[in-house]
Amino acid sequence: MENAMTAGAADEEEADTFILWVLIWSELAAFGILIAAFLVASLIAADDFAVARLHLKPAIAAFNTLVLLTSGWQAAVAAGKGASVARRRRALVLAALLGFAFVAIKIYEYGTEIRFAGEVAFHSFFELYFLLTGFHLVHVGFVAIVLLVVAWNPRRANVDLVTTLWHVIDLVWIVMFPILYLV
């Protein structure tokens, strides 16, 4: 009887892991398509994109990158093998709060950039920029909420799943940041 219960739990964990990886690969594909569209458009309208980039705030984005990576570090602390329930909970809450800080900083950054989006020469750049970063922003905000939900009851399997997803969101931003702000 005990072996059947253990086998059932293992099958359930494998199903959860499979669904997580399907989600991760679908997210990476979606972001990959958006990034590819941005790169193609930047080749087609190189001069307009170069001038439009001058209206971005790379210093704010760099600081926000540090905020997000610090959040990822807290997620890693929560997922640590020796982490107590209290430590997992505290690290997940910190990761979520830093995720919300990322959202707030990004919204502030949008406020400094939105006035340039209406200029005809910059339309393609800002349309793709806001689509790409906005899609990422929604993911950060949503998964930050999920981090708080998991912090309420930080079972090991749930912590592993949500922190893996959080690290994928970090990875996407690490790829996006230089493409949007530094190229």
Image: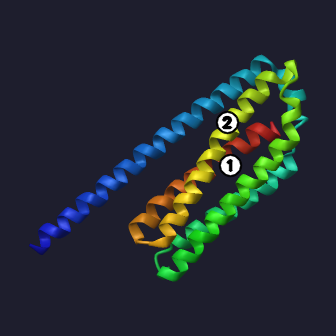
- For disc 2, the marked residue is 132
Q: Please identify the quarter of the rendering in which residue 97 is found.
A: bottom right
Q: Which labelled disc corresponds to residue 174?
A: 1
Q: Tag 1 or tag 2, which sits nearer the N-term? A: 2
Q: Is residue 45 left or right of residue 84?
A: right
Q: Which mark is residue 77?
A: none
Q: Is residue 134 above or below residue 15?
A: above
SS at badge 1: helix
Q: Quadrant of the N terminus?
A: bottom left
Report whether 25 appears left or right of 167.
left
Give the residue at x 86% y 19%: 121
The one nearer the camera, 78 or 109, is 109
Say which residue appears at 82% left-offset and 22% top-offset. 46
Q: Amino acid at mark 2?
A: Leu
Q: Quadrant of residue 3?
A: bottom left
Q: Amino acid at mark 1?
A: Ile
> Badge 2: few (under 14), some or many (20 or more) residues near its Cα, within 10 Å?
many
State how far apart marks 2 and 1 are (Cα): 13 Å
Where is residue 15? Give x, y as percent.
30, 53
- Which residue is pictured at 88% across the width and 23% down the height? 119
Q: Can see residue 47?
A: no
Instruction: Please provide percent x and percent y for residue 34.
Output: 62, 31
Look at the picture and state if 124 lies above or below 129: above
Percent x, y of residue 152: 49, 72
Percent across and percent down for residue 104 are: 75, 54
Q: Nearer the viewer, mark 2 or mark 1?
A: 2
Is any atom of residue 182 visible in this view? yes
